[in-house]
Image (cartoon, grey):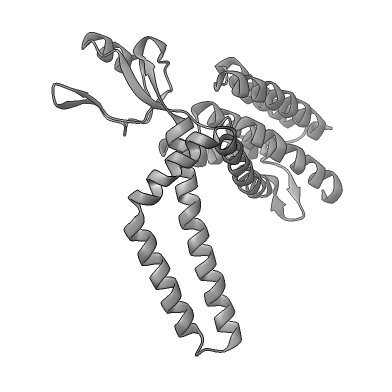
Amino acid sequence: MVEVLFGILLLFGLIFGSIFDLKNREIPDYLSYSMILGSLGISLIYSMLTEWKFLLFAVLGGIIVFCLGYIFYYFKQIGGGDVKIFTAMGIALGNFYIGRVNLLIIFFIIVLIIGGLYSIVWGIVLFFRYKKHSWMELKKILIENKSLRIIILISSIVVLVIGIFFEWEIRLIIFLLIVLINILFYLKMFVQVVERLHFVKKIKVSELTEGDWLAKDVIHNNKILISKKEIEIEKKHIELLKKNYIYEVWIKIGIPFVPAILISFIILVITYGILG
């Protein structure tokens, strides 16, 4: 069955991708391109044996996923290697359904849920692993946001008092919204602590690699030499830094996300085996 071939290709690709991502925070191009070419190859051979529509939908799935992945990549939410892996999965899953729902839609719903939980757990582990520095940084951020915290607290109390005059269903909705707003506000501070301590790092220009993300603008002679808004560091940027004798830069380090994709894929396979 063609599903088994795709499953084996993606499973082994994601396992090795997870190992590389956890170890080096980087996915080798040969691995991601092998997954893409492998998915295309299986789709092509299967199409030759059945109908060309299969290859068409496989390519269409890859294009759609690539475009969506590039948006996240542009805003520096995932790396280029993650986009290539997602593209391979778009090709492999584009023809399969559970009922009338395409597997790609189900997969991305699972990724959003698992990816969110995975990121939170990763952050919590880092926070408490270096809890002394984490609590110190959290105190700084709380002080920085003192005025905003007071505004949110007063607003929450006022809205809750006003909610007393409504029916219990409305009161419940208001209460839940207030709780959610406060959770999101303090969760944002938690994320800031983890980012400042663990995801922003100063490194030597000699250690820079293509694909790194700048966390801060590179200033030279009171002018921005390279903006942090650049999608990623390219070879020309590294050469420019060396030419201007810049020795260190601040970069942003992302969470190794391929393990979350692997977990999501395993859940998808189980779901497809039960419901497909």
- The image shows a total of numbered marks equal to 0
Screen quadrant of the N terminus: top right
In this orientation, does residue 77 appear? no
Question: Please, is residue 149 above or below residue 156 in the view?
Answer: above
Q: Is residue 248 above or below residue 70?
A: above
Tell me the quarter of the picture where residue 21 sits. top right
Residue situated in front as seen by the camera: 147 or 34: 147
Query: Is residue 88 found left or right of 243 in the rendered image?
Result: right
Horizontal arrangement in the rendering, residue 99 relative to residue 214 (left or right): right
- Point out residue 262 in the picture as x, y percentages from the top left corner: 69, 33
In the depicted structure, whether residue 80 falls above or below residue 178: above
Residue 101: x %, y % from top left: 70, 53
Residue 235's image quarter? top left
The answer to whether residue 107 is left or right of residue 131 is right
Q: Nearer the viewer, residue 82 or 105?
A: 82
Percent position of residue 224, x then y:
20, 27
Vertical arrangement, residue 41 with respect to residue 161, above or below: above
Q: Nearer the viewer, residue 100 or 34?
A: 34
Residue at 59% across, 41% down: 124
Q: Is residue 233 visible?
A: yes
Residue 143 location, x and y as percent?
Answer: 36, 50
Nearer-the-camera pick, 244 or 2? 244
Q: Residue at x 76, y 42 (%)?
A: 267
Q: Residue at x 61, y 19 (%)?
A: 23
Q: Residue at x 66, y 32 (%)?
A: 259
